Each structure stands twice: as C-alpha cells, then as structure tokens.
Image (cartoon, helix red, strand yellow):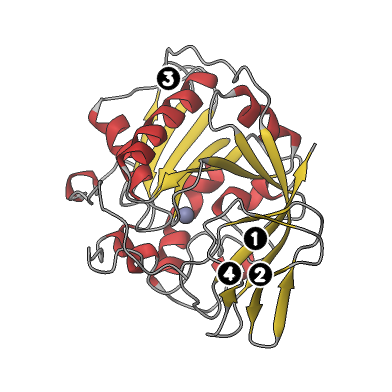
Amino acid sequence: MSTALPPIEVLPRDLAAYRTGNTGIDYVHRFESGRPGPHVMINGLTHGNEFCGMVAVCHLLDSGVRPKIGTLTLSFANVAAYETFDAAQPFESRLITHNLNRIWSSAWLDGAEDSVELRRAREMRPAVAEAEHILDIHSTSQDVVPFWVYPAFARNAAVASALPRPGVHLVMPAGLGSGTPLIQHGAHSGAEGPGAALVVECGQHFKQATADLAVEVALDFLGHFGLIEREVKPAPTPPRRFELLRTHVIQNASFAFTRPVIGFETFAEGELIATDGPIEIRALCDDCTIFMPARTAIVGREGVYLTKPLA
Ligand SMILES: [Zn+2]
C-alpha cells in the first residue's frame, strides 16, 4: 500500500472567526432570504482532513453570500478533528474516534455511546434534519477523478445530473452497508425524502484543484436551486455511472491489495482484488471497478468499495 505522503498544496486555516454562528450551534450559519424557496445546506469537513469543503464554505461566508430565495445553511462539521492536523501525518486528522459520516442513524444518535463525533452529530442534528437539499463536500485520499456519491433515489440523480460536474456518479441502491452517512439522516433516508442529498468527492484531499472544484460545485448547487444568480447547465456528455455492490470493512491488519491501486481499477469477475487475513475479496462482476481503496489497513475502517459500471 502507498505510504508516501502527497504534497500539501492547501493548508488548514484558523476557523475561530466562523465559530459563533447564528443558529446556536458552533460553526453553523444560517441565512434567510425572507422569501419562499428551498432550504439548502452546504457542509464541509465531515472528515477533518478534507480541506476542499472548508475552502468552499469559507469562500461562501467570506464573499458574503446571501440567498435570493429560501434559506441557506453553511456548516463546518468535524472542526475538532480538523484542528488536530499534523503535516507529518496528514491522513490522521480524518476523525478522532468515529467516522462522522457513518453515525447518522437514530441507533447511534440516540444511543448511549459518547465521542467527539457523536457529540458533534447530536449538536448538528437539528440543522441537518431541517435542510431540504444537502451538499456534503468531501475529498479522496488518492488522486482520482472527482465523483458524486448518493443513494439511488430519483431526487438525487436528478440534481446530480443537472449539474455540469463532476461527470462520474457512484450510486448506492442499498446504501453504504457500513453505516448511515449524513446525507441519509432522518427524512433523507428514504425515496420520499424532501430533496436532494449528495456527497461530492472533489479529488485528492490536499490539492488546490480539489478546493477549486469544491467552490464551483457549491456555487452550481446554489445556482441550481435559485439561491444565487448563476447559470447552471448539465454537462454536454452523459455521466459515467457506477453502482455500489459491496463495501468491504477491514477485519485484519494484514489487509492488502494484490497490486498497487488508487481507485477506478477494474477486475474480471472472480479475480482476486485484496486479501484480509483468511478473507478473499474478489470481483463480483466483469469490469468490477474499485473505489476508495484504503491507503493503510486500519481494522474497522473501510478497505474498498466494489462497484459495477452501469450502461
Ligand atoms: Zn470524506
């Protein structure tokens, strides 16, 4: 597995100035237009080392964005993990205890366990629950093309397809299989949810191009719903779509891929992709395409997504 550190082109900023919002929840800001319209939420830093979302939300706040219609909520999620960033170990500040993007079920949120992430999810819960349309901005550990990730509901596909970028969609007919992400909290868990709830993976965590894309996608999302003046058209070519078949969660520290991978490699049906102690992870179909391969094997964390290209 790759352990060389990538260059850090985007560094964390001090977010102290954004701490006190106007919602009673730290790092959550809400702007009401006073006119009817959708309630749109743009969230960054669900993972503490995914700086592109921080850059996009800072850009919106710093530029004084105000919705022409409806309501806009802007938030930074896992600031506690973000603040632990260490350039010598830049992948460590993804989370402190729990993956903040897997604990949005009532089982976790109403449960007895405690952690930095559970506390933060419980604090942010009303803001997430109130939003009709959610853009949750992420990035990837490996330098791969940007893509959307969303449950395979028509309300999500319609919005992702109406936006010009990114041109790759990872759809999840059965969810992630490894927990409940923010975009599937509450009313957004089912087909009849109030609106679109999308993750955008903007590229490698620390690249400037990733941050630049996050800003554009956030502006496109706001333009699509009419909150800002911006012309938004779908891409001229149809998206490449993949369906998530299975998420493998690492069981053994010896988890390893059979060859170096970064994501988007394809395997023939039955071909060995990785081993995890005695477990063999094999391709589930022809052209089985992997997403999100782990850089390092951490037991209990996701090792790889197995997907099938859709025609
Ligand atoms: Zn992420």
Label whose residue precedes the other's in the sequence (3 or 4): 3
Q: Which residue is mark 1?
A: 305
| Residue 131 shows in the view | no
How packed mark 2 is, by other alpha carbons closer than 10 Å (few <14, some 14-19, many 20 or more), is some
Left or right of 54 on screen, residue 225: right
| Label whose residue precedes the other's in the sequence (4 or 2) | 2
Looking at marks 3 and 1 on the same chain, the residue that comes earlier in the sequence is marked by: 3
**Residue 158 in which image quadrant:** top right
Residue for badge 2: 248
Q: Does the beta carbon of the residue at mark 1 sit less than 8 Å from ligand 1?
A: no
Tell me the residue that label 3 is attached to. 34
Please identify the residue farthest to the bottom as the structure is shown: 278
Q: Is residue 127 above or below residue 164?
A: below
- Residue 96 x, y percent position in the rendering: 37, 71
Q: Is residue 25 above or below residue 100?
A: above
Contact? badges 1 and 2 (CB < 8 Å): yes
Q: Distance of mark 3 from mark 4, alpha carbons?
A: 46 Å
Kindly report which numbered mark, 3 or 4, lies closer to the viewer in this rendering.
4
Q: Nearer the viewer, residue 107 or 256?
A: 256
Above or below, comparing residue 166 to residue 250 in the picture: above
Q: Return the residue found at the far front.
A: 259
> Does the rendering let one see residue 48?
yes
Label placed on residue 31: none
Identify the residue at horizontal 24%, vertical 49% (top origin).
19
- Quadrant containing the C terminus in the rendered view: top right
Under 8 Å from ligand 1: the CB of mark 4?
no
Rendered residue at 23%/51% (across/down): 12
- Tell me, yes or no, whether the two marked residues, 4 and 2, touch with CB atoms within 8 Å: yes
Which residue in the protein does label 4 denote? 303
Separation (CA) of disc 1 from disc 2: 6 Å
Residue at 46 percent across and 28 percent down: it is: 71
